[in-house]
Image: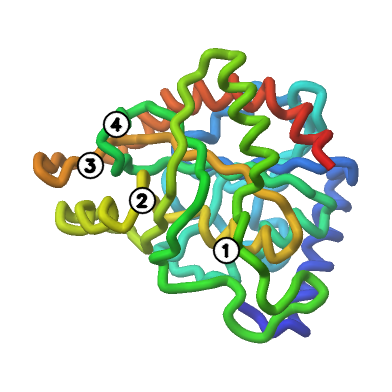
Amino acid sequence: MPHADLLMPRLDAAVAAVQAAGAPGNARVALVLGTGLGDVVERMAVAGALPYERIPHHPASTAPGHAGRLLWGAWAGTPLLVLQGRFHLYEGYAGGDIAFPVRLLARLGVKQLVLTNAAGGLNPAFRAGDLMLIKDHINFLGQNPLTGPNPDAIGPRFPDMAEPYSRALQAQARAVAARLHIDLHEGVYVAVPGPSLETAAETRFLRQAGADAVGMSTVIETIAAVHAGVRVLAFSAISNVNDPDDYQPATLEQIIANAGIAGEKLVRLLEAALPGLAGCP
């Protein structure tokens, strides 16, 4: 992460580029799309798009299934910013790099951030294609985006993590899922560095640690959002279920396909929930 006195000018340059490209200033909700979930933007009325490489100091997506664009427009009558593709430590980025897009969204006026990811199921009650509401997380990444000098203009030195995922936003998601008869699991997400998938022994350990799903993203973004005063709502698309006693390989093609099944449920849920999320104080 750049020194605090360099970070703010870099954010200012990124904000200026996004605004110059035509992004409106009225979006209070942003959505980050994970592996296999990029197609949810088909339901959105896209007014504009900006490739990440045209945003100063913004990282570039290299992971399969991540388009690498900032979109703006409206969905379900709700002004929205969308990051179509995210960043991971395994791509060679540091925690501060991964935090940069979230901090950019906060500077653009976003108050509610919806994070999505594809994750391996650890809870034996889960099935591939299920959708999980993230209630809490475990950071096994070995990095924190707040390491180093604190940018006081963004947030406090020691942000409280008693509620990393907004309880109020979770309650809205539960209510919408119940109304639409969408089976919505809830659980703890654990983030690991990757890019290799977990061994059977690691899977057993992560289960014992209290995790219900495992992935390689989301946690750094959540910490950065909480630090910036942005409330977070997060979902995992369960792409496969890891049984350490009958361990089976998972291909990228299977992961993306199963994430797409869960993504269909997530699209229905978000379409109904977005107006309420935008109106949440």
- Mark 3–mark 2 Cα distance, whole angstroms, equals 12 Å
- Amino acid found under the numbered disc labelled 4: Ala
The span from disc 4 to disc 2 (Cα, nearest Å) is 13 Å
Residue beneath label 2, please? 211
Chain-order first, disc 4 or disc 1:
1
**Image position, residue 157 (x, y; %):** 70, 79
Residue 248 picture location, percent across and down: 14, 40
Quadrant in which the N terminus appears: bottom right
Q: Residue 242 bears which disc, if any?
A: 3
Q: How far apart are marks 4 and 1 (CA)?
A: 32 Å
Which quarter of the figure has residue 103? bottom right
Q: Is residue 116 left or right of residue 198?
A: right
Q: Which of marks 3 and 4 is nearer the N terminus?
A: 4
Residue 235 left/right relative to 208:
right
Residue extending farthest left: 245
Residue topped by disc 1? 98
Which label is found at residue 125? 4
Residue shown at 47% from the left, 55% from the top: 137
Q: In this view, does 228 lie to the left or right of 138?
A: right
Residue found 65% across the figure and 21% down from its top: 43
